[in-house]
Image (spheres, rainbow, N blue to C red):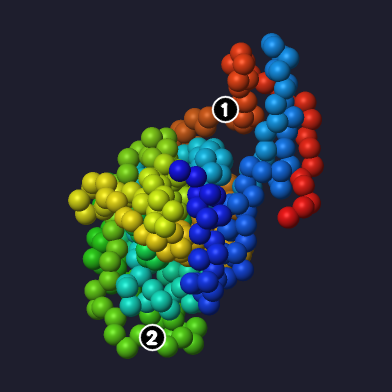
Amino acid sequence: MKLAPLVLRYQADFERKYASRLTPEIRHAMAVVLACRTERYGKMRLSCPSCLASAEQCHSCGHRSCPSCQQYDTGQWLARQENKLLPADYYMVTFTLPQEFRSFAWRYQREVYALLFRCAMDTLRTFSRNDKHLGGELGMTGVLHSHSRSLTFHPHVHVIVPGGCLLKARRQWKKHRGQYLFKPENLARVFRGKFLAALREAGFYLPKRYPRQWVAHCKHVGKGLPALQYLSRYLYRGVISENNILADDGTHVCFQYKDSKSDSMKRCRLPGEDFLWRVFQHVLPKGFRRVRDYGFLHGNAAKTRRLIQLLLRVRLPIPKPKPRPRFMCRQCNCSMNIVAFIRPSLSG
């Protein structure tokens, strides 16, 4: 099922129930989902060179909250990361905020998410510099997720780390070995201290009660291009795939998700307005970057990254122009040509 018809059906009830919590970003995200692949964003006129049939195709919105527009972002990210590829083990480290901080985090999203990124990266830098087998700067890609698999509010940061670092003075690549990059319990303990200190420094009051033990995970995710392909599917997924929206009976929406504990598919049935809240509460503040590169994976570290690739004798893929999407003729199944672009409609 598509998300747009559900927004159209339950929008009025949704806005009545959650009026006090709707941000301008949420309202805008709902509007673009409704307008995606409509004349609001313009369209293309197509012509078939074989049977001379003609057709029109509306443009997509390209918004990061639209589940119909995630495939393009995935391809773009993967193409960029292929140029940074290293023959190393890749690890995914996850830092999660405890439940006691979640209502506070939703209220101050921009500030808390920025601190979450900063403290996660500082934690990994501290461990890499002090590690006797590494002792240098890591390359890291951080990705913010604010949702659990069942779409509840659950802010956490995934950090993708190639297993190694460059010792610049020696021009030497130090390779990490092992199933885990660092011990998760130690990562969680240091992250907790850094995050609480950062909150106090920023002038925020801490909750009266919060757990002494926080959660961090560290997972080996493979090597090379297969690891990147796995991560691109994982990191650039939307909040919900439209394939997982199963049914709408006019009052309730049923969707499925994969339970992280049992590794099996489960179903959740919610009133339509509550389902929309599950989806749109995760719209990020305007301009906030949910994917960030650090260390030798940063965009400004091209020279350092190239030195590492030379030391490891990496053969970079030959750049290929990104092919245009193909539109197939419904009559003869031949690829159609774009013959004109029609400007967006200003109505609505």
The dot on residue 318 is 1
Compare residues 314 and 90 and report the one nearer the observer: 90
Compare residues 332 and 316 and report the one nearer the observer: 332
* Relative image position of residue 199 (x, y in whole percent): 44, 81
The dot on residue 6 is none
Pointers 2 and 1 in contact (CB under 8 A)? no
* Relative image position of residue 246 (x, y in whole percent): 38, 45
Identity of the residue drawn at 79% across and 51% down? 346
Vertical comparison of 255 with 339: above or below = below
Q: Secondary structure at mark 2?
A: loop
Vertical comparison of 53 with 131: above or below = above
The dot on residue 206 is 2
**Number of numbered discs:** 2
Residue 182 seen from this side: yes
Residue 234 seen from this side: no
Between tags 2 and 1, which lies in front?
Answer: 2
Vertical comparison of 313 with 179: above or below = above
Q: Secondary structure at mark 1?
A: loop
Identity of the residue drawn at 79% across and 30% down? 340
Residue 343, quarter of picture? top right
* Relative image position of residue 263 (x, y in whole percent): 23, 47
Identity, as a three-letter code, of the amino acid under mark 1:
Ile
Q: Farthest residue in the top direction? A: 50
| C-alpha distance separating marks 2 and 1 | 51 Å
Identity, as a three-letter code, of the amino acid under mark 2:
Leu
